[in-house]
Image (spheres, helix red, strand yellow):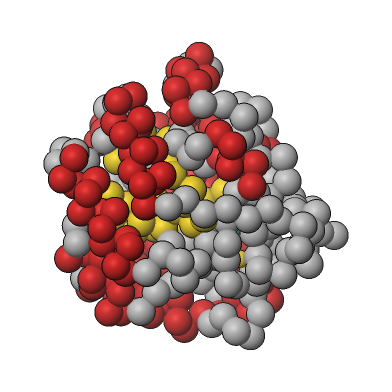
């Protein structure tokens, strides 16, 4: 029965809520077959090539207080740093030299990064390296700001929706944040012509398998260019310190379901997946993922971008990060 459902999903690229739920409930029995079919679909569209994006973590300051996140404003133990415009450009220089052609500027919601500063950085990256794509991942901003940044040359924006369930959203975030504003941001980004990446954590507190089935229907409807998912990982200095981390196996299975649902999607095997299981990212790639985002942040700040406990790749130089992925057979 499970096999027939995977075959149906490969054929139709959509299942009903009940069918998705059946697969998620029984995933242990069917994950190998799902990975095999998802890899085949990815190979047919993209070949075996894995897309590499250079991640520059620009700031560990954040005005928000997501209950799960280690860099939340309320975490007094978090060490804070922010990169200046020229430090960001130095990371891009180094990345370009190493062969990176996409830079992802990611950070907490930090008012230091005004539109003026960001437009300068984006334009300068594009001037120095016209053959690169600039991706932003800087959280919720105004419609006007997204427009200004797009006009300055930003190509893509990653903003995880975190959960497609409004009630669940309110259990993960304080009242100062809203599901509706997050959806407004995603809608704006699409309308402005960004290539958009959304995503969610697997095994976040209060998430049910029904929620996960709905995530797949949400993604199908939204048709994003990229979907970033990773397991929730407990951070000791957050309100969710008492909750267990999510499952790497279930995350890998969901990567396969996402590949089969959105065959053309760019699908990263995330650092969180690699943190929870040593071979997590490799297994993600084998299950249908096709993007890796090695860290290009300066070595001395990496440990401070601590979204969850025991994050990997916080010690190495950028070049070593790339080398390590290659060594591990990716
Ligand atoms: N575990 C896993 N992922 C997390 N993120 C934030 N905190 C955690 C955590 N404790 C994810 C969120 C956010 C992205 C940048 O990192 O989904 O959107
Ligand atoms: Fe910064 Fe969630 S804590 S956006």
Position above or below: 154 against 284: below
Is any atom of residue 254 visible in this view? yes
Which part of the image, by quadrant, shows the C terminus? top left
Q: Is residue 120 left or right of residue 221?
A: left
Q: Residue at x 52, y 41 (%)?
A: 270
Position above or below: 233 against 240: above
Percent across and percent down for residue 159 are: 43, 62
Which residue occupies the extreme right position in the image?
242
Q: Is residue 261 left or right of residue 132?
A: right
Of the pair 233 and 91, the residue shown nearer to us:
91
Position above or below: 329 against 175: above
Q: Quadrant of residue 95?
A: top left
Q: Residue at x 39, y 74 (%)?
A: 141
Of the pair 146 and 19, the residue shown nearer to us:
146
Percent across and percent down for residue 223 are: 31, 61
Q: Residue at x 40, y 32 (%)?
A: 39
């Amino acid at each position: 029965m499970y096999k027939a459902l995977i075959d149906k999903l490969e054929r139709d690229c959509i299942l009903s809520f009940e069918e998705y739920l059946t697969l998620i409930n029984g995933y242990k029995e069917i994950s190998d077959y799902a990975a095999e079919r998802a890899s085949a679909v990815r190979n047919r569209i993209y070949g075996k090539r894995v897309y590499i994006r250079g991640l520059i973590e620009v700031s560990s300051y954040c005005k928000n207080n997501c209950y799960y996140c280690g860099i939340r404003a309320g975490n007094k133990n978090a060490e804070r740093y922010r990169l200046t415009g020229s430090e960001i450009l130095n990371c891009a220089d180094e990345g370009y030299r190493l062969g990176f052609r996409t830079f992802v500027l990611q950070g907490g919601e930090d008012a230091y990064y005004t539109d003026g500063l960001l437009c300068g950085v984006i334009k300068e990256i594009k001037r120095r390296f016209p053959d690169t794509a600039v991706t932003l991942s800087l959280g919720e901003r105004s419609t006007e700001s997204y427009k200004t940044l797009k006009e300055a040359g930003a190509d893509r924006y990653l903003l995880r929706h975190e959960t497609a369930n409004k009630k669940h959203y309110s259990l993960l975030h304080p009242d100062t944040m809203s599901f509706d504003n997050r959806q407004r941001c995603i809608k704006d980004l699409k309308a402005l012509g960004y290539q958009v990446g959304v995503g969610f954590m697997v095994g976040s507190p209060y998430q049910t398998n029904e929620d996960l089935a709905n995530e797949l229907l949400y993604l199908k409807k939204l048709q994003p260019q990229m979907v970033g998912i990773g397991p929730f990982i407990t951070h000791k200095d957050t309100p969710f310190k008492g909750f267990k981390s999510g499952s790497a196996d279930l995350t890998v299975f969901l990567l396969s379901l996402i590949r089969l649902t959105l065959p053309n999607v760019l699908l990263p095997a995330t650092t969180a997946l690699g943190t929870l299981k040593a071979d997590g990212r490799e297994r993600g790639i084998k299950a249908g993922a096709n993007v890796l985002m090695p860290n290009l942040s300066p070595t001395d700040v990496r440990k401070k971008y601590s979204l969850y406990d025991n994050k990997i790749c916080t010690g190495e130089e950028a070049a070593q990060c790339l080398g390590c992925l290659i060594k591990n057979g990716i």
